[in-house]
Image (cartoon, helix red, strand yellow):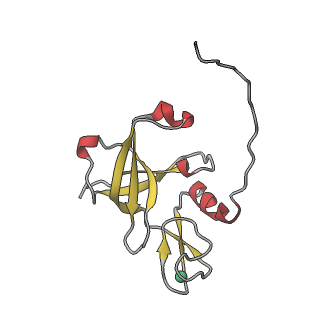
Amino acid sequence: MDPLIIRTHFEVDYIHSYKQDTPFFHGLAKRKLLGSHCPKCSYTFATPRTRCMYCGGATEWFELPSEGRVHSWTVCYYAGQEFMKDVPFTLVLVGFDGVNTLFLSRLIGVERADMRIGMRIKSKFRRKATWSVRDVYFVPAQDFS
Ligand SMILES: [Zn+2]
């Protein structure tokens, strides 16, 4: 017996708020990558956080360096529907000097064979903001060291 397949049309406008993370996305639109810093214990996050995960203190925004290093990477050969047209693509965990956590982003412009842990990369921003984390991506820093 063949499986029963039913087609149902489904469409919805999904409206959501970035709430406390809103400054992060405004930062991307201004070509700034913002992290969060805890003034109480000095822990720094490469991601938006309103509260420190160590001491619970309120965090403050700061601008991350434009350059970082590849901490780890993977090549994605499968993705959700929105990104299937882009496969394969490279995801990197970016480490920044003086920052305690990593930032997940795309790396563009490096062949898989040329990927290296520790390679220097720099942030780039879309010209027109889409108000998503895709507004920032990384490319190799010029000297590859
Ligand atoms: Zn803290």
Residue 66, image x, y percentages: 43, 62
Left of 90 or right of it: where is 34? right
Tag count in the figure? 0
78 or 49, which lies in front? 78
Q: Residue 2 is drawn in which quadrant?
A: top right
Residue found at the very far top of the displayed protein: 1
Quadrant of the frame with the C terminus = bottom left
88 or 142, which lies in front? 88
Quadrant of the frame with the N terminus = top right
Residue 74, image x, y percentages: 35, 47
Q: Is residue 144 above or below residue 11?
A: below
Residue 52, image x, y percentages: 56, 77
Q: Residue 108 is drawn in which quadrant?
A: top left
Residue 56, image x, y percentages: 59, 81
Left of 38 or right of it: where is 98? left
Residue drawn at point x = 76 percent, y = 39 percent: 13
